Image (cartoon, rainbow, N blue to C red):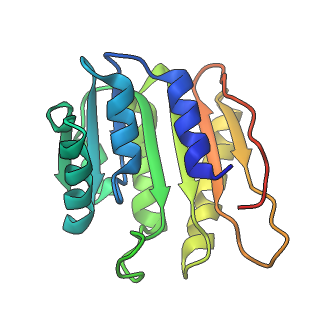
Amino acid sequence: MRLTEYVHLCLEKHLNNGDYVLDATAGNGYDTLKAAQLVQPDGRVTAIDIQKDALQATEEKLTQAKLNTLCELHLGSHGELLERLNQTFDAVLFNLGYLPGSDKMVITTPKETLSALNQSPKLLKATGILCVTAYRQHPGGQEEADQVAEWMREKQTQGWSVEKIEPNHTSDYLSPLLWIASKGTLSIPSFANRDI
């Protein structure tokens, strides 16, 4: 099972009609679309990305699925835009790295991601889940993943429930990492740890 599939499985277990979701790194829009499908018809999804191409791809998917009216798309850095939000969400999602199929030099950075993560506790409902996937193969990816790991360790000392998932690989490929966290008790499906 791919980590992206597992995140969607967790969202299926957690989200319902009327819920609110924040996709802090929209990318090509797959997580935004999945969230919109799960919270329709009364929920809302807020999606952020620093690249226009990402938001255009996201909007196209939402429009094709006739779910674009449920979503707000914002162009900008997740580190800055999360500071301006003043509502709470049932799920907050991050996919860290670069936009697949685009310029690999345009990446999320440890500084921006840490700023965004630091905003997450006030944005997350008491029963909400935080999903952070960190891709590590590109330059700067491991450093960013290390910062996320440290942030998650700190949250555990504050009583958060945190699960870390790292798929097994037989090659020297540096697999992505996934953290799922909650202020309360986590109830998530088991991960089928197969090579991807």
Q: Is residue 67 left or right of residue 33?
A: left
Task: Please report the residue visible at 41 percent of the width from the left and 45 percent of the height from the top.
Answer: 31
Task: Please report the residue visible at 57 percent of the width from the left and 72 percent of the height from the top.
Answer: 141
Taking the view exactly as shown, the residue that stands out farthest to the left is 69
Quadrant hosting residue 138 = bottom right
Q: Position of residue 88 (x, y in %)?
A: 33, 25
Q: Compare residues 134 and 144 and report the one nearer the observer.
A: 134
Q: Is residue 87 left or right of residue 97?
A: left
Quadrant into which the C terminus falls: bottom right
User: Is 78 drawn above or below residue 45 in the view shown?
Assistant: below
Number of labelled discs? 0
Task: Please report the residue visible at 24 percent of the width from the left and 31 percent of the height from the top.
Answer: 86
Quadrant hosting residue 134 = bottom right
Task: Please report the residue visible at 48 percent of the width from the left and 61 percent of the height from the top.
Answer: 96
Quadrant hosting residue 122 = top left
Q: Is residue 119 left or right of residue 45?
A: right
Q: Position of residue 176 (x, y in %)?
A: 64, 62
Q: Position of residue 152 (x, y in %)?
A: 63, 45
Taking the view exactly as shown, the residue that stands out farthest to the right is 170
Q: For residue 76, say whether it is visible.
A: no
Q: Compare residues 4 and 133 and report the one nearer the observer.
A: 4
Q: Position of residue 100 (x, y in %)?
A: 42, 70
Taking the view exactly as shown, the residue that stands out farthest to the front is 64
User: Is 43 drawn above or below residue 65 in the view shown?
Assistant: above
Q: For residue 134, say whether it is visible.
A: yes
User: Is 181 drawn above or below residue 132 in the view shown?
Assistant: above
